[in-house]
Image (tube, helix red, strand yellow):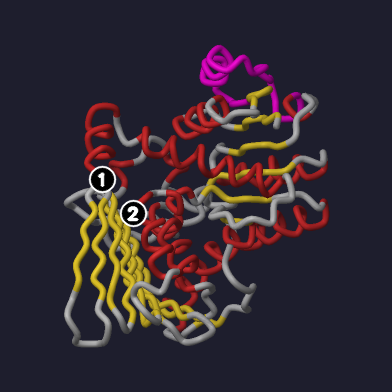
């Protein structure tokens, strides 16, 4: 497959490397408003450096990878579908619910594949959880606990990354967007949301410092959720799934798992721990980007399988997953205002 790339920042450069390291794939064009960044990608990959989005769209290609600032995703997505291209878009899909719906509709009307970069699905700790639930290792799922956070504004390189409306919102649109997706991925769907947002620490209007919520799927299985920008001890994410025959936990960083199983409630417990020392050493020597890159490669392979019409099982998030993550964040804000739960229409089993 031939790919174009919009956005050659930190994540865009990793996306370019993922294409270069995926057999049968090539990056043929790149555009960034910072031409120096685009030229660096061009030198490393042989991609043509375009002076504008329109110029990039003139280059023959099969699909577009979008890693630009979130408020610029809409234009690039719509142009790509008009040109008949498939799209792999960085999360969040867009910066509003309505524009996310617009992009999902455009993909469907064009008959093109739209995928969203929820790459944590490919991290070993969270793959382990998904597989443990699917394989029945913890019995029937009863509930989830989901957490993601970091210190907040000092983590960001540019204002658009945290300032609404360009960012979409605060913690739920940043680290929390991944956790929202994982909650839905493990629950199967989210159709009811109740929660509370606050903006008392960083005081950025429309960008929540903290969001605490309860999500429920159509079967009534619940997830407790928190996304925060006031996790003073640093970046961390964790998911726990509890069933009637045990529990499974996944964390990052560092990457690790805990699995506790039993034949019956209250029975003898069997404990397994996985610590991934190879990942920890590699990240210490060469940074977290090495793990992100491997997840991008796996995600890209699944994307190409979808484009190729594969009926095999993939982990990749589709456009509806990106839309539902935005709808859930919006629902928590509405619930904060009304004090009531917000119901969402079901889309079906999450992908």
Q: Would you call the spot at circle 1 few (<14 residues within 10 Å), some (14-19), or many (20 or more)?
A: some
- Of callouts 1 and 2, which one flags the residue occurring earlier in the amino acid sequence? 2
Q: Is residue 205 above or below residue 139?
A: above
Q: Nearer the viewer, residue 86 or 195?
A: 86
39 part of magenta stretch: yes
* Crowd tier of the residue under label 2, counting other residues whose Cα lies within 10 Å: few below 14, some 14–19, many 20 or above: many
- Residue 125's label in the rendered image is 2
Residue 240 magenta-highlighted: no
> What is the magenta range?
31-55
Residue at image point 55% right, 82% down: 343
Mark 1 element type:
loop
Side of 280 relative to 288 (left or right): left
Q: What is the count of numbered marks?
A: 2
Circle 1 residue: 276
**Disc 1 to disc 2: CB gap under 8 Å:** yes
Determine the residue positioned at 27% across, 82% down: 263
Q: Nearer the viewer, residue 215 or 163?
A: 215
Q: Position of residue 329 (x, y in %)?
A: 48, 66
Asked if residue 101 is positioned above or below residue 10 in the image, the reply reads below
In depth, the one of 343 and 222 nearer the eye is 222
Q: Using the rendered image of the protein, determine whether residue 198 is visible from the camera's viewpoint.
A: no
Going by the image, does 33 lie left or right of 55?
left
């Amino acid at each position: 497959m031939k790919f174009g790339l919009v956005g050659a920042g930190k994540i865009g450069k990793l996306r370019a490397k993922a294409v270069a390291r995926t057999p049968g794939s090539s990056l043929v064009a790149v555009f960034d408003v910072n031409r120096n960044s685009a030229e660096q990608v061009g030198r490393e990959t042989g991609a043509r450096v375009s002076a504008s989005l329109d110029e990039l769209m003139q280059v023959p290609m099969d699909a577009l990878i979008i890693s630009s600032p979130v408020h610029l995703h809409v234009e690039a997505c719509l142009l790509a579908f008009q040109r008949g291209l498939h799209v792999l878009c960085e999360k969040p899909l867009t910066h509003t619910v309505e524009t996310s719906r617009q992009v999902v509709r455009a993909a469907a009307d064009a008959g093109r594949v739209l995928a969203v970069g929820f790459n944590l699905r490919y991290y070993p700790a969270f793959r382990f959880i998904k597989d443990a639930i699917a394989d029945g290792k913890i019995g029937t799922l009863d509930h989830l606990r989901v957490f993601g956070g970091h210190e907040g504004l000092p983590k960001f390189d540019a204002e658009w990354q945290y300032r609404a409306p360009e960012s979409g919102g605060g913690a739920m649109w940043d680290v929390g967007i991944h956790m929202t997706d994982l909650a839905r991925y493990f629950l199967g769907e989210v159709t009811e949301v109740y929660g509370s947002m606050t903006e008392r620490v960083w005081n950025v209007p429309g960008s929540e410092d903290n969001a605490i919520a309860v999500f429920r799927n159509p079967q009534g299985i619940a997830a407790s959720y928190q996304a925060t920008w006031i996790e003073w001890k640093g970046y961390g994410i964790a998911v726990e799934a509890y069933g009637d025959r045990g529990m499974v936990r996944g964390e990052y960083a560092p990457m690790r798992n805990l699995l506790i199983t039993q034949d019956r409630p209250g029975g003898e417990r069997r404990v397994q721990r996985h610590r991934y020392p190879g990942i920890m050493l590699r990240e210490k020597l060469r940074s977290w980007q090495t793990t992100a890159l491997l997840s991008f490669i796996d995600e890209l392979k699944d994307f190409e399988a979808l484009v190729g019409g594969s009926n095999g099982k993939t982990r990749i998030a589709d456009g509806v997953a990106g839309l539902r993550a935005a709808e859930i964040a919006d629902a928590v804000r509405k619930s904060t205002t009304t004090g009531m739960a917000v119901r969402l229409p079901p889309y079906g089993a999450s992908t």
